[in-house]
Amino acid sequence: MYSFNFGVIEANADKFLYGLALGLGLALAAIVVGTLIGLACAFATRARARLPRMLVSGYVSAIRNTPLLVIVLFAYFALPQIGIKLGKYETFIVSLAIYSGAYLTEVFRAGLLGVPKGVVDAGRAIGLTGLQVALHVISPIMLRNSLPALGSTFISLFKDTSLAAVIAIPELTYQARKLNTETFRVAEAWATASVLYLSTCLIIAAGLRQLERRFPKF
Amino acid sequence: MDKRKFALLAGIAAMVMASGFGNTALAEGRLEQILQRGKLIVGTGTGNPPWHFRDEAGDMKGFDVDVAKIVAKGLFGDDTKIEFVNQASDARIPNIVTDKVDMTCQFMTVTAERAQQVNFTIPYYREGVGLMLGAGGKYKTHEEMKTAGSAVTVSVLQNVYAEDMVHYALPGAKVDQYESIDLAYQALNSGRADAVATDMSSLQWFMKQNPGKYVDAGYGWGPQTYSCAIKRGDQDFLNFVNTALHEALTGVEFATYAASFENWFGVKPPEPKIGFPSELR
């Protein structure tokens, strides 16, 4: 019979919290870059020219059909052997950003599809330029449309930072695994990591719901 | 019959009986049991090259296996008269104590604590931690790495003493812990680490599999002695196994031992010095 002992968790609380903070930092950096990629690609799908649309659809299907772990391992171990070497953290952030960029492209594209054509026409009618319509008419509506899907993408992005453990980045999963090998407190280590992931995700979700509620309705 | 004669006879009878019992006791010793049985039963594992593993043909191979074969050859003049019992590391002592095996040779680290439960034979290998570098890399030796301080990254298999283990040899080095040793090797290949630190025997085996690609930094630390173990209390059998091993390390069977050593670790063991026996110096 397994007897619980959370003393080791208490003694290593600082490591768990450091791991959690590191995971949040990685996610935040990836979200910023991924959102930029997603926005650019989503607008590119609306372009009249065929090339940008084809490039974006190629990128989205290639990345969405490859496991993130494979992308991370490829970027960390394989790229340096063909001469592309970023640091450990940079490698992970770039991998996660490129990965999330593909999902965010789809999120924003769906948001764009939900922008009524009449509103765009109205913008043109009052003499706005194409860029002004995109910035002041399309973007706010698209963002409003995208918010719910955006929230779930952000949350899964944060959970994906657990994969950084594989390339020796000392985030939450790494700390839990380390404590597990060191103390054999397997249930305590993974339970603590689960609870930390769960509660952090719930907090992020609640924050995003608040944002959704406060966002101006159209 | 006077009393003195009676006492003398009784004394002789007692001596005969005692020596007779002594003989039966000897006949029931492990050595005689094994000789009567016609094969040696050895406990070892199957999944740890270069120590003990099954090759493609399903045959037991490895350095532990070869050491056991040396003992079998000493018993029967035939190193195939041996039965291997597959056991996990945590079964090493229990299987000896419960007579499931005559002897265990399974990279077993000698500790005084374990010696309270089993008898260890003389050692056949001294394990330690080593550093493996890429051939033609930035660093060539342990000294260079030590001087470079925190500029050095060492990849290791995640374990309890990983940080302390590396810092003993390289106090300033950064330590990246991976969840499998393959990833630690891969980190070296990808230039993510300057060296891999792990058991010297694993490094030597890996270097043997990949000739010319890696070099040993020339420093080993964290010694651990590997010996076979037998059940406690049979000094006669212990003497026999010790003799067989001793003569493999320093005597007539040295060629067998040396060939096996070189086969698994890629380097020759030092030749025994001819003349005065060095162990008695």
Image: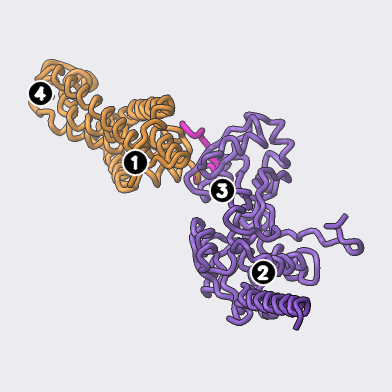
Chain colours: A orange, B purple
Label 1 is placed on what type of residue? Ser
- Subunit bearing disc 1: A
Q: Could you give the CA–CA distance between mark 4 and mark 2, rounded to whole angstroms?
A: 95 Å
- Label 4 or label 3, whichever lies nearer to me, is 3
Label 3 is placed on what type of residue? Tyr
Q: Nearer the viewer, residue A46 or A74?
A: A74
Q: Secondary structure at mark 3?
A: helix
Q: Provide the residue designation for mark 3.
A: B185
Question: Magenta span covers which residues?
Answer: A78-90
Label 2 is placed on what type of residue? Phe
On residue A3, which mark appears? 1
Is disc 2 in the same subunit as disc 3?
yes
Q: Position of residue A132 (x, y in %)?
A: 22, 18
Label 4 is placed on what type of residue? Val
- Label 3 or label 1, whichever lies nearer to me, is 1
Q: Provide the residue designation for mark 2.
A: B237
- Subunit bearing disc 4: A
Q: Residues within 10 Å of mark 3 (few under 14, many from 20)?
A: many
Q: Could you give the CA–CA distance between mark 4 and mark 3, rounded to whole angstroms?
A: 59 Å
Residue at 22% from the left image edge and 33% from the top image edge: A152
Q: Position of residue B63 (x, y in %)?
A: 64, 64
